[in-house]
Amino acid sequence: MSQWKDFVALVTGANKGLGLEIARQLGKLGIRVVIGSRDLGKGEQAAAKLKEEGVDARAVQLDVTSSDDIAALPAFFQNNYGRLDILVNNAGINVESESWRGSTAGNISSDSLRKTFDSNFFGAVAITQALLPLISASPAGRIVNHSSILGSLTLQADPKSPIYDTKPFGYDASKAALNAFTVHLAAELKPTKVKVNSAHPGWVKTDLGTDAAPMETPEGAQTAVTLATLPENGPTGGFFHAGNRLPW
Ligand code: NAP
């Protein structure tokens, strides 16, 4: 019998891309997965696909920028499962992906910056806070914030680092803020069983990562899945890629 029997996971932005693959891999471990999707129809299609593969999956309406959708989450999990063990804050956007050289720190519009922070930072914080009572009641609560190496201030500041020349400001700042949330929440929850970590998936072929990326989603999902299923003696408050720590 799976050690994850009865466990329940929510993956935000899981109708496609890395989120869908993370849901698939958690589901294959025997975890019941809930696909957060801002378009419920797309979420239900994704859940149906996973069900065909033997995964216990369902969808929930979740625009991470909608306070109504977020407010409805605790009752959804309480009523349908009576628990929530794993939260993967995966939903994210990069409004600058096509043209970040035209929207640098010196000239990005406040609108673009706010839009990016709403999805990549404020949404994750609000969802986590809403679900924390349920996750805290789990025997092994795990929170994974899907970040990016581009949010590493240490590497962004190092002219020798491989990402030094890639500076979409809104995206990078939102992921640095998300990393700050990881550090602060992990410290706050240190006396509890809940572990909180940031994941960098690698550069992965998705709509966000583009076809130019070298990695496929099954490999890219692995860092988040590992952090979502850490054993009791696993780390908390870290930033990881493929088993290695990244600098903040
Ligand atoms: P993707 O294929 O574009 O998928 C992004 C997902 O987020 C989609 O399901 C999208 O939903 C959802 N989303 C966006 N805004 C949302 C909102 N307001 N509410 C709910 N869902 C929302 O991108 P991905 O590459 O899988 O990215 C997943 C995560 O990995 C992101 O946080 C990204 O920053 C991170 N990441 C990716 C890479 C990479 O190389 N791919 C590298 C580093 C980090 P819709 O389908 O409705 O748009």
Image (cartoon, helix red, strand yellow):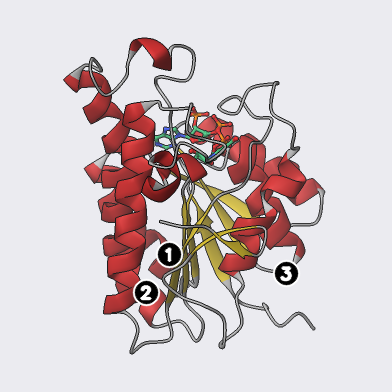
- Secondary structure under badge 1? helix
Measuring 41% from the left and 27% from the top, which residue is drawn there? Answer: 167
**Rounded to the nearest whole Å, what is the CA distance between mark 1 and mark 2?**
8 Å
Disc 1 packing (10 Å; few <14; some 14–19; many ≥20): some
Give x and y (percent) for residue 65: 29, 38
Distance, label 3 to label 2, CA atoms, is 20 Å
- Farthest residue in the left direction? 110
Mark 3, residue position = 30
Which residue in the structure is indicated by mark 1?
Answer: 77
Between the C-alphas of marks 3 and 1, the distance is 18 Å
Dot 3 crowding, Cα within 10 Å, few <14, some 14–19, many 20+: some
Helix, strand or loop at label 3? It is: loop
Secondary structure beneath disc 2? Answer: helix
Q: Which of the two marks, 3 or 1, is nearer to us in this view?
A: 3
- Looking at the rendered image, the quarter that the N terminus falls into is bottom right
Residue at 65% x, 66% y is: 226
Residue type marked 3: Gly
Which amino acid type is shown beneath numbered disc 2?
Leu
